[in-house]
Image: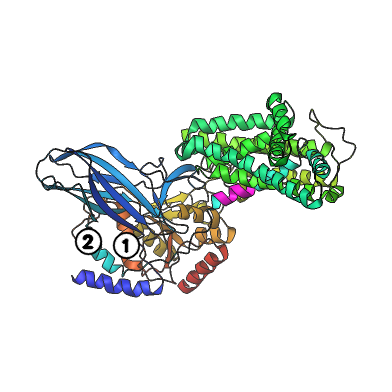
Amino acid sequence: MKKIIVVLSFLILSTSSFSQILNPVKWVTSVEKVSESEYDLLIQATIEEGWHLYSQNVPEDGPIPTNFTFVKTDAYELVGNTSEEEGHTVFDAVFNMNIKYFENKAVFKQRVKILSKSNFKITGEVEFMVCDDSSCLPPTFVDLEFPIQTKKGITSVNFNTKEKKETAKSTEIKNKIKLKKEKKPLDKSLLTIFLIAFLSGFAALLTPCVFPMIPMTVSFFTKQSKSKAAGIKNALIYGASIIIIYVALGWLVSFFFGADALNALSTNVWFNVFFFIILVIFAVSFLGAFEIVLPSSWGTKVDAQADKGGIIGIFFMALALAIVSFSCTGPIVGTLLVQAAAGGNHIGPIVGMLGFSLALAIPFALFAAFPGWLNSLPKSGGWLNTVKVVLGFLELALAFKFLSNADLVLDLHWLEREVFLAIWIAIFGTLALYLFGKIQLPHDSPLTHISVGRLSLGLISLMFTIYMIPGLWGAPLNLISAFPPPQHYSESPYGVGFSKLGGGSNNNHSDIPEGAHLMAPHDILAFNDYDLGLAYAKKVNKPVMLDFTGKACVNCRKMEQNVWPKDKILNILKNDVVLISLFVDDKRPLPEGEEVDSKLHPGKKLRYIGQKWSEMQTIKYGANAQPFYVLMNHNEENLNDPVAYTPNVDEYYKWLKEGIANFK
């Protein structure tokens, strides 16, 4: 009891200043009777706003998956595996893999066959990990209980999971501190799909199949409308018809594939390869090798309906536009549907088609309503085919992203970072040569001079090509970090010609201290053993930086990839502090003799190395989220207040300098 009081007192003091103990997931269990001999064990997780719980099925080297274990007895047996709900599947740029997770609520189900005629209790345990936009929590274990009451004939029992005594004690110690979360904004992935689709719609307007249709459409409405008001009305109906047609296409994709199939599209290797092939075909079409057209009979039948006039006639005019312009809009629409489907969200194709059709419909409707504006439009010409070719190059570059996804999942190392960048350098370098007039393609008009717009695009493409070249030598390329494979997935993780022991005073040592290693790719000297790191810090007379991290901590990797590499930060980490990285999700067993009783969970022993560091962070610093950084002196006293996820480089630099100054 004294230990609990001491820990509680210390924790209240520490949390009042800078720390928080987070417990964003509550578990509830219930039992449903399926038949006389079978029951379903239901486990529901209620997740606080802003947090997400990972699926049971996470690829290797990804976050810690949710895992259920049940104590085996002679009274029952498991039937199959534990099932789970649909959830969300997204591509995580940090882990470079598709990861499934749950928000707000998740329900898991395990079927059991009852072998006993007496009432009994099934017990089990769930291990889980949760993250939000700024931190991850270490793997947590919670007890599960399911009363099976066969005699009374109860078909369902719903009750809060009886958590361990130690968990209740831990909750008391944590002082019921909760992190306030703002309401989540509009799903960023859907907003991104809409914006990309909207811009793609404007790009489609500038293709040779669509742009010339604008004056033809305006001429039709001008002649057919008896008054200006009627013209505006017909123009609005025409624009709405365009939107309805394309949104219906997006809805059909969502309806026929369904959410599960779209998730499969985003995660399946062979679908990624299929997308690659489709996008290459679209790109080659745009470059002028051939045209993708719909059967001419379709256009003839639709034109016949359009001649009938009225609202029905206007709708079929919009449908005729979609069919006639398909050779230009088809590849764009197909690419958008592929991208939206690859996001694993069943609403994505609908949102994508809404954005595309809106951009396409607005100009047609406005020019039809106000035909005088046509005088301000540029004349059709060879520039329209230039737009089409540029789109072809962009689609070709995008295609290799899907091929890269497949290669990463299969771990074939066929399309490593250097190869991917070499392909992109070749594509955008060739695009620059094309825009400068050094290359001509089949449908190009003779080029007598280069316009200012074409020259500007050429310069942008050339600059982008030059920007990517240092990536072959290990440059991080932050502007396109979400596209190429990660730096470790390469022929030379440290960059071509980079010396592992070069660049930094620590790295000039011919031998590395006992228990230390060099963190790739920045060669920061780091310890994973607290005692060895502290001893080395005393030896070299430098302050200690504790890095409470996790192998599966997304935001830890963001700090290491986006903040630590900055020159002023990297210089400090290499030369001014001794870094001790303590992984709270390290599942290696503690060495024999080091197993101790948990102070947070009385009656339980710490089983893993990660639990030791997690408990240390919770008790000493009153925090359980990662990343979490502490600067301390050789007496293990804080030099300043610890910080958590700090993506602002200047703020993080100021924190480091403050702690180092206090040490000196």
Q: Position of residue 115 (x, y in %)?
A: 13, 38
Q: Would you place residue 459 above or below residue 422 in this image?
A: below
The numbered mark at residue 166 is 2
> Is 289 a magenta residue?
no
The numbered mark at residue 657 is none
Q: CA distance from mark 1 to mark 2?
A: 16 Å
Per the image, the residue denoted by label 1 is 616
- Name the residue nearer the viewer: 218 or 610: 218
- The amino acid marked with disc number 1 is Met
- Name the residue nearer the viewer: 18 or 506: 18
Q: Position of residue 112 (x, y in %)?
A: 21, 39
Question: Are the residues at dot 1 and dot 2 in contact (C-beta closer than 8 Å)?
Answer: no
Outermost residue, left side: 118
Q: Is residue 54 left or right of residue 382?
A: left
Q: Is residue 562 left or right of residue 358?
A: left
Q: Is residue 458 left or right of residue 424?
A: right
Report which quarter residue 25 is drawn in: bottom left
Q: Position of residue 299 (x, y in %)?
A: 71, 29
**Count of number-bearing discs:** 2
> Is 195 a magenta residue?
yes
Q: Position of residue 471 (x, y in %)?
A: 62, 44
The span picked out in magenta is 190-197
Q: Is residue 609 left or right of residue 261?
A: left
